[in-house]
């Protein structure tokens, strides 16, 4: 009987109580993308100390959360949900990668007319 009770508790504990994400995948993806870009920017600052880089990142992090009306505890709870649902977290990062690819393509295309004119001048 004890074994049955222990197995029942284990089974109930493993079942996710939330079936839907607490925040849309597209929205958490946009927020995470901004946070990752801020982190990359902050840590690429070579003329600063590690402490200054951490401070710069923390400023960006807080500003990003404020932009989306989130507090760190709320954002951490969202992340906890996605950590417990790896397939959905994979969807978030797929969204981020697609978005970054689009950004790169747009940036390349925006430079294209300039490169085209430059090549025409050299002929």
Image: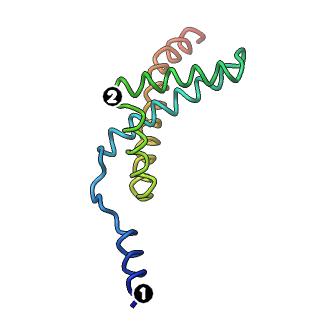
Disc ID at residue 49: none
- Quarter of the picture containing the C terminus is top right
**Number of residues whose C-alpha sits closer than 10 Å to that of mark 2, classed few (under 14), some (14–19) or many (20 or more):** few
Mark closer to the chain start, 1 or 2? 1
Residue 55 image position (x, y, % from top left)? 59, 21
* Front-lying residue, 78 or 40: 78
Callouts 1 and 2 close, C-beta under 8 Å: no
Q: Is residue 55 placed above or below 95 in the rendered structure?
A: above
Q: Distance between the residues labelled 1 and 2?
A: 48 Å
Q: Name the residue under label 2.
A: 68
For residue 95, what is the image quadrant?
top left
At 30% from the left and 44% from the top, the residue drawn is 23
Residue 85 position, x and y percent, is: 41, 58
Q: Is mark 2 on a helix, strand or loop?
A: loop
- Name the foreground residue: 37 vs 55: 55
The residue furthest bottom is 1
């Amino acid at each position: 009987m004890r074994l049955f009770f222990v197995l029942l508790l284990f089974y109930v504990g493993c079942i996710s109580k939330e079936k839907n994400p607490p925040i849309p995948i597209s929205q958490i993806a946009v927020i995470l993308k901004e946070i990752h870009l801020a982190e990359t920017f902050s840590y690429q600052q070579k003329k600063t100390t590690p402490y200054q880089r951490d401070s710069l990142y923390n400023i960006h992090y807080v500003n990003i959360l404020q932009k989306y009306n989130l507090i760190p505890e709320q954002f951490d709870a969202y992340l906890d949900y996605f950590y417990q649902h790896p397939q959905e977290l994979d969807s978030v990062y797929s969204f981020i990668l697609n978005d970054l690819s689009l950004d790169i393509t747009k940036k390349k295309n925006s430079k294209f007319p300039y490169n085209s004119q430059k090549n025409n001048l050299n002929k």
